[in-house]
Amino acid sequence: MAISRSQLVKELEPGLNALFGLEYKRYENEHAEIFDTETSDRAFEEEVMLSGFGNAQVKGEGQGVSFDDAQETYTARYTHETIALAFSITEVAIEDNLYIKTLDCYTNCLQ
């Protein structure tokens, strides 16, 4: 279903001062301060945790060295997803809109 004039009532009347919520681009890349961004060309990525070694033993003179084993203990798998959203708008809603620049914000300001 397309966006119609009945959903844009205030944009069809004179006197509109502003549209709320169209300034998201002002806050560019705030996530970069908290999160690392990685790229991938695979369907999924895995990270494996290795176990640590035990405590080192005191070796007596002439004695052999103690050996320990390591192994994989946990695997985390990250499966990549595609996230998408679209919209449509009627031609009449575009023609009758008094604030045509606000329609541009549906594609430019909200990205």
Image (cartoon, rainbow, N blue to C red):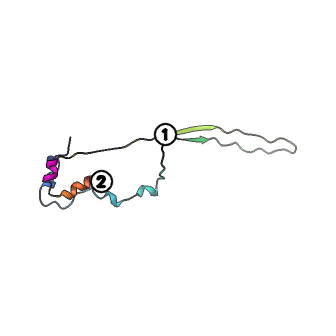
In the rendered structure, the answer to whether residue 96 lies left or right of residue 31 reads left
Q: Which residues are magenta?
A: 91-96
- Residue visible at 17% across and 58% down? 99
In the rendered structure, the answer to whether residue 95 lies left or right of residue 79 reads left
- Residue visible at 60% across and 37% down? 73
Q: Quadrant of residue 102?
A: bottom left
Q: Which element carries disc 1, helix, strand or loop?
A: strand
Q: Earlier in the sequence, mark 2 or mark 1?
A: 1
Q: CA distance from mark 2 to mark 1?
A: 29 Å
Q: Is residue 92 magenta?
A: yes
Q: Quadrant of residue 103?
A: bottom left
Q: Return the x and y of residue 97 as percentages of the image width and height.
A: 15, 54
Q: Which element carries disc 2, helix, strand or loop?
A: loop
Q: Looking at this view, is 60 or 12 the one in front? A: 12
Q: Amino acid at mark 2?
A: Leu
Q: Return the x and y of residue 38 as percentages of the image width and height.
A: 48, 50
Q: Is residue 104 magenta?
A: no
Quarter of the image with the N terminus is top left
Looking at the magenta stretch, what is its main secondary structure? helix
Residue 110 disc label:
2
- Residue visible at 85% across and 41% down? 63
Q: Is residue 19 above or below residue 84?
A: below
Residue placed under numbered mark 1 in the picture: 44
In the rendered structure, the answer to whether residue 71 lies left or right of residue 100 reads right
Q: Looking at this view, is 41 or 111 the one in front? A: 41
